[in-house]
Image (cartoon, helix red, strand yellow):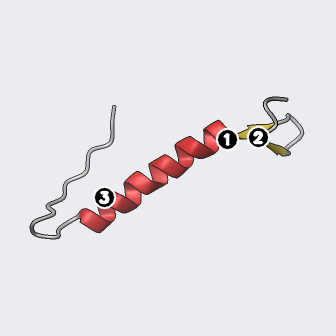
Amino acid sequence: KAPYFTASALKGEGVYETLREISKLVVKAVSKKILLNDGKGRSVVGTGGL
């Protein structure tokens, strides 16, 4: 199920909170794609694989 956020740009209600939560989701998704774990607790960034 997709997250749901209530906001009104015209009233300025919930806009910052919505942006903050969406930003967290984007950072989490990008981190999963970029950072790879080599099985020894080390992160391997941009090496094309393990």
Q: Is residue 11 left or right of residue 7?
A: left
User: Given the image, on which type of amino acid does mark 2 rest?
Assistant: Gly
Along the line of sight, the residue nearer the viewer: 1 or 50: 50
Q: Nearer the viewer, mark 1 or mark 2?
A: 2
The quarter holding residue 3 reads: top left
Quadrant holding the N terminus: top left
Q: Measure how far apart labels 3 and 2 are at the Cα level.
A: 30 Å
The mark nearer the N terminus, 3 or 2, is 3
User: Given the image, on which type of amino acid does mark 1 rest?
Assistant: Ile
Q: Measure how far apart labels 1 and 2 are at the Cα level.
A: 7 Å
Q: Nearer the viewer, mark 1 or mark 3?
A: 1
Circle 2 sits in a helix, a strand or a loop, which is it? loop
Q: Residues within 10 Å of mark 3 (few under 14, many from 20)?
A: some
Residue topped by disc 2 = 46
The quarter holding residue 19 reads: bottom left
Circle 1 sits in a helix, a strand or a loop, which is it? helix
Residue topped by disc 3 = 18
- Give residue 40's position: percent from left, percent from top: 89, 39
Mark 1 touches mark 2? (CB < 8 Å)? yes
- Give residue 17's position: percent from left, percent from top: 32, 64
Residue at image point 62% right, 45% down: 31
- Give residue 13's position: percent from left, percent from top: 17, 68
Q: Is residue 15 left or right of residue 2?
A: left
What is the number of the mark on residue 34? 1
